[in-house]
Image (spheres, grey):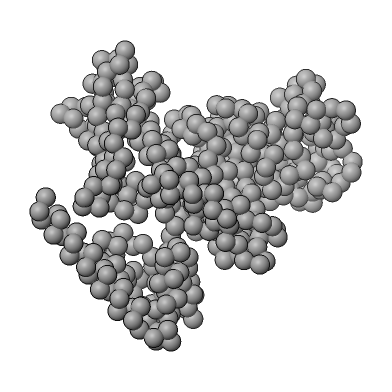
Amino acid sequence: MTLRLCETILRRSLRFSAIRKLTAAPEQAPLDLRGSGCSVFGPQTVRKCLFHCTPASLVSSGTFLDRLQKGRAVLSDEGLCHHPVSVPSDSGHQFSLVLKDPDQPKNAKSLKVAIVGAPNAGKSTLTNQLLGRKLFAVSEKVHTTRSRAVGVLTQDDTQIILLDTPGLESLLVDPFESIKEADLVVVLVDVSDKWTRNKLDYEVLKCLALKPDVPVILVLNKVDLLKNKTLLLDITAQLTEGVVNGKIRIRGAEKPHQKLAAKPHSRHTEEPHSESMKDGASQEGQDKDRLSPEELKALKSRRGWPLFKDIFMLSSVDREDVETLKRYLFEGAKPGQWQYHSEVLTDQGPEEVCISTIREKLLQYLPKEVPYSMTQQIEIWKESEDGVLDISIKLYVKKDSHMKMVIGSGGHMITRITQEAENDLMKIFLREVRLKISAKLRK
């Protein structure tokens, strides 16, 4: 304990000394930052690579410190030096940050993006990659995302709001609400799943039919797992019914929809596109948020949607692929007010993020129904004397057999879950975390 306390005092004194040297320098004196990950905040910060600098870039010390504290990019002659925004580990701080007035520039632009798709299409993985941080739980099992979460991506004068929705078959009301708010809808399809890749999910079609005036793009995900890449053309033809942006014709579309695909479609077209695409918004006296039984029946016979504006084929785990989509989103942003302050990364509280992170590990390592029958309770959430965030979680298990699976042989399983969740939380909060997970039988 004494050694830890001495180490903390020494580290803080070095940190304070370094800051004093920087702030004491004249405003015009440049600070030479060399290398790909230099830092003035001690070895711990360097190890976590909190920001990366352009080699031999020159910025003034005052500007550097000001932007570093605000979590923004440091401008230089060479380009941008980004300091990633973190999720505050204090719920009060996070709450006040979410409610803080946006610090938007004069010519602000914004875009709300709803990412929808069948369960396990890769929505959370794509959202994490766009944010540049693993923030939302990812698992091959269904119902990983239980409620809508918001990710905020702010760059220069533009703010992108990413609405990471649950699988459309797990909670129907919530995704529909996201569609209503969205300026752009991203329909994600897993092309590695041969059972679902040739037909849009029925719940996705319902969302699109309810709001046909909202621009939609199709993202074919997990193309790296598709051995026969020539199938991509056939899959695209099926899912778009042969039409993209009302102009491009794709061979291979199904015959029943050739008549529909023969006419170009646009958001500004006044003609109805088809009987199955008419919704309450296009008919007077009908509820805008509901489809008639006839329309729902017609949707069940459909395989695709002819109003996609653009198509992307990518792997959500490939950074270059995601960067292409990211640039597209920023270019599509329109003049508008920001919704959040630039330091906000998500609207979730730190406790929600923690519970979600642990849930991901439970889904990943425990079989079948075991993770779904368990509940979590936060027992301890505080900063210790050595500056480490101490978190203690109690898992409540319903069966003796489940308890054995959670603990594992010699405590191996619960130790593995704890270590991996702890590492993820340190990357999210950008600070040291000491996580303890215990299990208790509650029948």
Q: Do we see residue 313 in this rendering?
A: no
Q: Is residue 281 above or below residue 65?
A: above
Q: Is residue 121 visible?
A: yes
Q: Quadrant of residue 4?
A: bottom left
Q: Position of residue 9 (x, y in %)?
A: 18, 62
Residue at 49% across, 75% down: 75
Point out residue 437 in the picture as x, y percentages from the top left corner.
26, 33
Q: Residue 401 is drawn in which quadrant? A: top left
Q: Position of residue 436 (x, y in %)?
A: 24, 37
| 280 lies left or right of 79 | right
Where is residue 21 shown, x and y percent of the image? 29, 79
Q: Nearer the viewer, residue 322 or 159?
A: 159
Q: Residue at x 69, y 48 (%)?
A: 183
Between 297 and 443, which is closer to the camera in this rendering? 443
Identify which residue is drawn at 39% across, 68% down.
Answer: 52
Q: Examine the rendered structure and indicate whether residue 66 appears above or below residue 292.
A: below
- The residue sitting at 23% across, 64% down in the picture is 12
